[in-house]
Image (cartoon, rainbow, N blue to C red):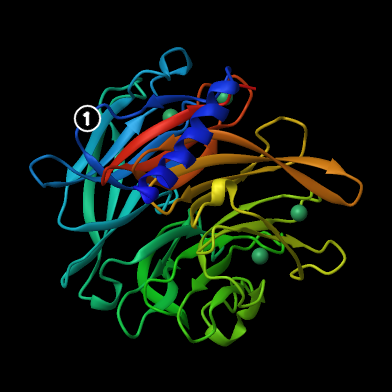
C-alpha cells in the first residue's frame, strides 16, 4: 500500500508540474502500428532536408524488420510518417545510416546475430524518378564467416581518405574487440572492403561511440566499460589514415574516472567553446557532465546534475540548445523505483563561472523507459525537438516531442 502510494507520488508531482506548464511539450507518434521497435537511428536519407528515421522492429507475427520512416514534410510532421520497408531479416541487432560506397547517397548497414552472415549493406534506389519519398532497397551481405562480429554494435566515422564513410563495429563474446571495416582503394576512387580491422580489446557489450573529440577532423572512438576491469569511459584518439591500422598508434585516454557506472553517453558543446563535451546517464540517476578544458584538450572538468524526481537510473541522455539562448541544455530519461519513467530538460542558465540547471519536465510514462532520445528540429520551426524510442509496457514506440519554446 505504502509502495503504491510512493509510486503514485512521482506521477502526481509530475502530472502537476506538466499541467502547470500549460504550453508543455506535445507528443506525436511517428509510427502508428503495432510494431515493437528496438533500435533507432536518424539522418536525412532521401536528401530532402528533413531528417528520417531507420529502425529495427518486430511485427505482430514476430518477423524482424528493418524499416525507414521518411519525414512526410513540415506541414504534416505531426501525423504518422511514411513507413518504407528495407526488408524482413534474420536476427538484426544494430543499424547505422552511412554512405559506405561513397556515392553521396546514404544507405543502411545492419548487423545480425548469425554464424554465417554478420553484416549487410542496403542500398537506397529511387523507385520513381524525381520522387524522393519513393525508395526501394537492394541488400547484400558484406561480412560473412566472421562469428566475432555476430550481433555487433555499429557506428559511423571516417578512418581513411577514401570517398565515403567507414563502419565502426564492436564484436561480441569473450574476445570482443572494437574496430572498423577497412576499405582498400583501387583505381580512380573505387575500392573494395578488405575486412575487419580490430583496434582494441573491449568488454563484451560495451556501448561504443564515434566522435571527433580533439577536433582534428579524424573520428575518435569511445567505449564504456561497466565490469570490474577498468570501468568507465575510454577514448581512443585517431592517429590519422597512415597509422590507423596499427592498434598501438591509437592514443588511449580515460574520460572522467571510474566513479559512476555509466549507462550511455551524449555529445555536444556544453560550455560554448566549440570543443565537444559529454553528458552521461548513470546507474545512480545522476547526470555526469564532462566538459573539455579549453587550455588542455582531452582534460575534463567533471560535474553532476542530481536526479530529477528521485530517478533511480538514467536510461538516456541528450545535449542541445532547446531554449535557444546559445547555451546547451541537457535532456535525461529517468527510470523510477516502481517502473515509471520521466523525461526532463535541465535548462542551462549561465551565472558567473558555473551554470545553473533549471528543471523542466517533458513527459512521464506510468510504466516504461525512455530508451533513446535524439535532438532534431522535427517540425522545422527553428527550435530543437526530441525524437525518442520509448518502451511502453514493454513495447518499443517511436514518439517525438514538440518543443513549446
Ligand atoms: Ca528526408
Ligand atoms: Ca580526432
Ligand atoms: Ca565545450
Ligand atoms: Ca521544432
Quarter of image, res 187: bottom left
Extreme-left residue of the structure: 61
Left or right: 270 as drawn, with respect to 75: right
Extreme-top residue of the structure: 75
Say how many tags the image has.
1
Image quadrant in which the C terminus is located: top right
> x and y percent of residue 355 in the render?
80, 48
Residue annotated with mark 1: 33
Q: Nearer the viewer, residue 297 or 400?
A: 400
Q: Is residue 381 above or below residue 56?
A: above
Q: Look at the image and tell me whether residue 401 can be seen.
A: yes
Residue positioned 56% across, 75% down in the render: 232
Q: Nearer the viewer, residue 58 or 313?
A: 313
> x and y percent of residue 226 in the render?
47, 75
Residue positioned 53% across, 33% down in the render: 362
Residue positioned 45% across, 37% down in the render: 11
Amino acid at each position: 500500500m505504502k509502495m503504491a502510494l510512493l509510486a503514485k507520488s512521482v506521477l502526481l508531482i509530475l502530472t502537476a508540474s506538466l499541467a502547470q506548464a500549460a504550453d508543455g511539450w506535445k507528443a506525436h507518434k511517428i509510427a502508428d502500428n503495432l510494431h515493437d521497435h528496438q533500435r533507432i537511428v536518424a539522418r536525412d536519407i532521401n536528401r530532402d532536408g528533413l531528417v528520417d528515421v531507420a529502425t529495427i522492429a518486430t511485427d505482430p507475427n514476430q518477423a524482424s524488420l528493418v524499416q525507414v520512416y521518411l519525414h512526410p514534410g513540415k506541414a504534416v510532421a505531426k501525423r504518422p510518417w511514411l513507413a518504407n520497408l528495407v526488408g524482413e531479416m534474420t536476427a538484426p541487432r544494430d543499424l547505422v545510416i552511412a554512405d559506405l560506397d561513397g556515392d553521396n547517397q546514404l544507405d543502411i548497414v545492419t548487423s545480425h546475430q548469425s554464424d554465417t552472415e554478420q553484416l549487410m549493406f542496403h542500398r537506397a534506389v529511387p523507385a520513381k524518378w524525381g520522387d524522393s519519398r519513393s525508395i526501394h532497397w537492394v541488400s547484400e551481405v558484406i561480412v560473412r564467416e566472421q562469428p566475432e562480429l555476430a550481433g555487433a554494435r555499429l557506428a559511423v566515422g571516417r578512418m581513411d581518405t577514401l570517398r565515403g564513410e567507414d563502419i565502426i563495429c564492436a564484436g561480441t563474446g569473450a574476445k570482443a574487440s572494437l574496430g572498423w571495416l577497412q576499405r582498400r582503394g583501387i583505381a580512380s576512387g573505387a575500392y573494395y572492403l578488405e575486412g575487419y580491422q580490430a583496434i582494441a580489446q573491449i568488454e563484451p557489450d560495451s556501448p561504443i561511440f564515434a566522435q571527433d573529440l580533439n577536433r582534428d577532423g579524424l573520428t575518435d572512438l569511445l567505449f564504456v566499460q561497466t565490469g570490474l576491469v577498468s570501468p568507465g569511459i575510454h577514448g581512443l584518439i585517431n592517429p590519422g589514415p597512415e597509422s590507423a591500422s596499427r592498434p598501438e598508434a591509437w592514443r588511449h585516454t580515460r574520460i572522467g574516472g571510474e566513479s559512476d557506472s555509466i549507462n550511455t553517453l551524449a555529445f555536444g558543446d556544453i560550455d560554448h567553446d566549440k570543443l565537444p563535451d559529454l553528458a552521461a546517464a548513470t546507474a545512480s540517476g545522476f547526470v555526469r557532465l564532462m566538459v573539455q578544458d579549453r587550455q588542455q584538450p582531452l582534460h575534463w572538468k567533471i560535474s553532476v546534475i542530481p536526479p530529477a524526481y528521485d530517478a533511480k537510473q538514467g536510461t538516456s541522455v541528450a545535449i542541445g540548445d532547446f531554449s535557444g539562448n546559445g547555451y546547451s541544455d541537457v535532456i535525461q530519461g529517468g527510470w523510477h523505483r516502481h517502473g515509471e519513467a520521466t523525461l526532463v530538460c535541465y535548462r542551462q542558465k549561465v551565472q558567473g563561472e558555473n551554470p545553473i540547471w533549471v528543471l523542466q519536465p517533458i513527459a512521464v510514462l506510468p510504466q516504461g523507459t525512455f530508451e533513446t532520445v535524439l535532438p532534431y528540429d522535427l517540425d522545422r520551426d527553428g527550435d530543437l525537438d526530441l525524437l525518442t524510442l520509448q518502451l511502453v509496457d514493454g513495447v518499443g514506440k517511436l514518439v517525438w516531442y514538440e518543443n513549446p519554446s
